[in-house]
Image: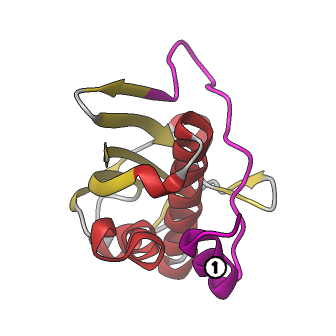
Amino acid sequence: MTTHIDRALEQLGLTLPEAAAPVAAYVPVVETGGLLHISGQLPFIDGQLVTGRLGDGVSLEDGQKAAQACGLMLVAQIKKYIGDLSRVKRIVKLGVFVNSTADFTDQPKVANGASELMVSLFGDAGRHARSAVGVPVLPLGAAVEVDAIVELG
């Protein structure tokens, strides 16, 4: 069955990756009180982890693409956990961590890569609260990491 999310992905020229397995001692998704808490997801594009630091060799555009890739992995985790993406009532919050130099201040612009994807896929239900912070290093040298809180209906 093709859903509006499948159609939106197709229009964007994107496909959902296979949900990544945890790389340490945690679970990808915890459900409590009608909310999914989704662990931080790393950016994989064409099966390769996007690494590096914004402000030191990674462009703003590449950072946005990395954040979008994290968003795709979040959706893949949701789909794997609940099966039917039509159960998503609201993307409540995204936490976006950007591997960046001390003088790089465009973390919100990087985070838009994930935020705009959520709105493109879920419409008004994809509008969310958000944090976008710069950090000196991320797991495996990733350029971006994004976690989420999602309300189920």
Residue at the spot 69% in from the left edge and 80% down from the top edge: 10
The answer to which quarter of the image holds residue 66 is bottom right
Q: Pick the quarter of the image with the N terminus.
A: bottom right
Between 35 and 26, the one nearer to me in the picture: 35
**What residue did someone put label 1 on?**
7
Residue at the spot 72% in from the left edge and 54% down from the top edge: 17
User: Which residue is farthest left?
Assistant: 129
Note whether 70 is above or below 111 in the view shown: above
Note whether 4 is above or below 30 in the view shown: below
Q: Position of residue 92 (x, y in %)?
A: 24, 53
Q: Main secondary structure of the magenta part?
A: loop
- Give the left or right position of residue 65, taking residue 48 as reference: left
Query: Disc 1 marks which amino acid?
Result: Arg
- Give the left or right position of residue 47, taking residue 138 as reference: right
User: Which region of the structure is painted magenta?
Assistant: 1-29
Residue at the spot 56% in from the left edge and 49% down from the top edge: 84
Between 39 and 120, the one nearer to me in the picture: 120
